Amino acid sequence: NAGVMQNPRHLVRRRGQEARLRCSPMKGHSHVYWYRQLPEEGLKFMVYLQKENIIDESGMPKERFSAEFPKEGPSILRIQQVVRGDSAAYFCASHLGTEETQYFGPGTRLLVL
Amino acid sequence: DQQVKQNSPSLSVQEGRISILNCDYTNSMFDYFLWYKKYPAEGPTFLISISSIKDKNEDGRFTVFLNKSAKHLSLHIVPSQPGDSAVYFCAASGTSYDKVIFGPGTSLSVIP
């Protein structure tokens, strides 16, 4: 059973460009969470999605950030018009729904130049 | 407002001895607590968890203790091994479907 997959592992963007981060949950998992880790900080919750639904987006910045988890395909975290402060590691986690543990992917390291 | 606190940014322990990592939380609504281990350039790996109805959970060399009245939990690693050197995150959630709130992490170094 493959774990949570994220791609790309590293992403470099210039200010003003768009960043798209993809997450494929573990097989059978229908709950996806996105977290961000800024340099020298812990992980901060961003958004919680189930298939085709956003359940909790209380950690998402109000502008430029959006997330989706379509019926088919991976979950996408989209950052429009990136700024240097968006440089961070973005982790996706998935959850079976019948147990509490979230399993994390390897992360996407975004660098904004 | 940091709901999950890990006041020791780093800890060094001799191989074979016990490592004790501490964590405090402020939200009494938390119902489930987890410890994750993280190596550089990798995602966090689930280590062990405990429900608020328990005060101890053990898995091999790892034991988590929960003191609800003090809003405190700790992770004990016995015996510590060099491969245990990593950043350890304490985390908590309100329900099984809730977001997980992470502490800032404690960097453990196990010295051979």
Image: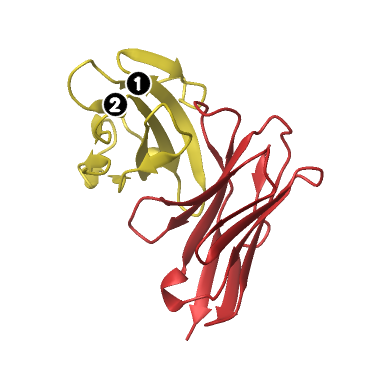
Q: Colour of chain B?
A: red
* Picture layout, residue A54 above or below residue A61: above
* Picture layout, residue B112 above or below residue A100: below
Q: In the image, which disc is placed on residue A66?
A: 1
State the image coordinates of residue B9 (x, y, percent, origin top left). 61, 62
Q: Nearer the viewer, residue A29 or A49?
A: A29
Would residue A53 be found to the left or right of residue B47 on screen? left
Can I make out residue A84 in this image?
A: no
State the image coordinates of residue A13 (x, y, percent, origin top left). 23, 40
Residue at x 61%, y 75% (from the top left corner): B18
Q: Chain of mark 1?
A: A
Spatial distance from mark 1 to mark 2, Cα to Cα? 5 Å
Q: Name the amino acid, label 2.
A: Arg
* Mark 1 surroundings: few (<14), some (14-19) or many (≥20) residues within 10 A: some
| Residue A3, quarter of the rendered image | top left
How many numbered marks have been drawn onto this rendered protein structure? 2
The quadrant of the rendering that contains the N terminus of chain B is top right
State the image coordinates of residue B10 (x, y, percent, origin top left). 59, 67
Q: N-terminal of the two: label 1 or label 2? A: 1
Which residue lies under the disc numbered 2?
A78
